[in-house]
Image (spheres, rainbow, N blue to C red):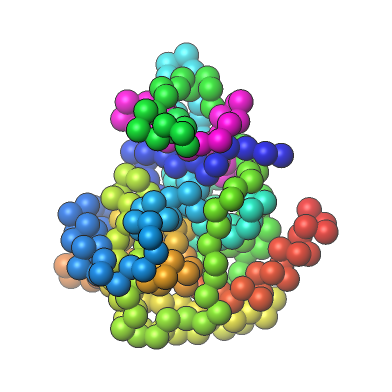
């Protein structure tokens, strides 16, 4: 089934990290400042936001569309990071815990990008990106995603989204060493892109099936809604998925962001098997 390109949403209800935190995440200014401090290392021709946005989809838990009152509600939100043109993606497993998870699309799909703004839903045409078209809630529908595999013992899940896209991430074969510059893409509400460095690398254990998987402690600033989003190296290669924040309890502040990465060979086997038995 074909749909429009990945849906990018602006929602006030954003998902917290695994630790239930209210206001101790990074501010928009802190995320922007961290990005600016590392931006010289970014290699792709596109800006970080422009590169990551079409490769990232917003996930909604228990979404409710109310066309009569022009309302869209969701219990929580997170991100899915696209791996294949037919909609296989990675996300943080805790994003799936708040209830049935869906993505939004236009009822009459067409090429372009859907976004929800403070002024309501809009659609950006590839030919006229500077002239977004206003949409009604009645133009949208929520489609459920499917869990393919949850990696036991870590906050990572492989999911299948009901969409096709030309934009996907390439996965790294190995984790970045400490000191590497990293970039992230979060929810639109939380300020989109940011950057930081690898602080510490650790390996996960007791996975089924056997997988090459790593945990990264990073200095990337974190806000609610960023969970499941991509962490990239300076070339745009996917090195991890945003999982949670580590918190200084005395300061009540998130001091580092944990990302989970996995080898492409492990995912290829799971995706190939699922395509044969969807």
**Residue 46 percent location from the top left of the image:** 38, 56
- How many numbered markers are drawn? 0
| Residue 91 against residue 1 in the figure, above or below | below
| Residue 182 against residue 54 in the figure, above or below | below
Chief secondary structure of the magenta portion: strand
- Residue displayed at 54% across by 70% down: 171
- Residue displayed at 73% across by 71% down: 269
- Residue displayed at 78% across by 64% down: 273
| Residue 109 against residue 90 in the figure, above or below | above
> Is residue 33 on the magenta stretch?
no
Residue 133, can we see it? yes
| Left or right, residue 59 beside residue 15 | right
Residue lying furthest top in this view?
68
**Residue 259 percent location from the top left of the image:** 43, 70
Q: What stretch is highlighted in magenta?
A: 100-122
Q: Which of 277 and 113 is in front in this view?
A: 113
Q: In which quadrant will I find the N terminus?
A: top right
**Residue 2 percent location from the top left of the image:** 67, 39
């Amino acid at each position: 089934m074909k749909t429009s390109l990945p849906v990018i949403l602006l929602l006030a209800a954003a998902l917290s990290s695994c630790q239930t935190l209210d206001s101790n995440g990074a501010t928009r200014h802190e995320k922007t400042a961290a990005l600016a401090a590392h931006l010289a290392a970014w290699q792709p021709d596109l800006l970080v936001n422009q590169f990551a946005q079409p490769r990232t989809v917003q996930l909604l838990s228990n979404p409710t569309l109310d066309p009569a009152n022009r309302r869209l509600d969701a219990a929580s939100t997170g991100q899915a990071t696209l791996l294949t043109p037919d909609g296989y993606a990675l996300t943080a497993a805790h994003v799936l815990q708040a209830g049935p998870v869906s993505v939004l699309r236009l009822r009459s799909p067409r090429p372009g990008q859907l976004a929800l703004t403070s002024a309501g839903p809009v659609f950006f045409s590839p030919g006229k990106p500077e002239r977004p078209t206003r949409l009604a809630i009645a133009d949208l529908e929520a489609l459920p995603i499917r869990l393919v595999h949850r990696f036991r013992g870590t906050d990572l899940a492989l999911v299948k989204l009901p969409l096709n896209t030309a934009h996907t991430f390439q996965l790294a074969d190995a984790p970045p060493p400490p000191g590497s510059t990293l970039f992230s893409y979060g929810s639109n509400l939380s300020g989109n892109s940011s950057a930081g460095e690898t602080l510490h690398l650790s390996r996960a254990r007791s996975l089924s099936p056997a997988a090459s998987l790593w945990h990264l402690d990073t200095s990337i600033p974190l806000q609610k809604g960023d969970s499941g989003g991509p962490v990239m190296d300076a070339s745009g290669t996917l090195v991890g998925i945003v999982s949670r924040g580590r918190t200084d309890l005395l300061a009540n502040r998130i001091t580092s962001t944990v990302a989970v990465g996995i080898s492409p060979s492990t995912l290829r086997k799971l995706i190939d098997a699922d395509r044969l038995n969807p």
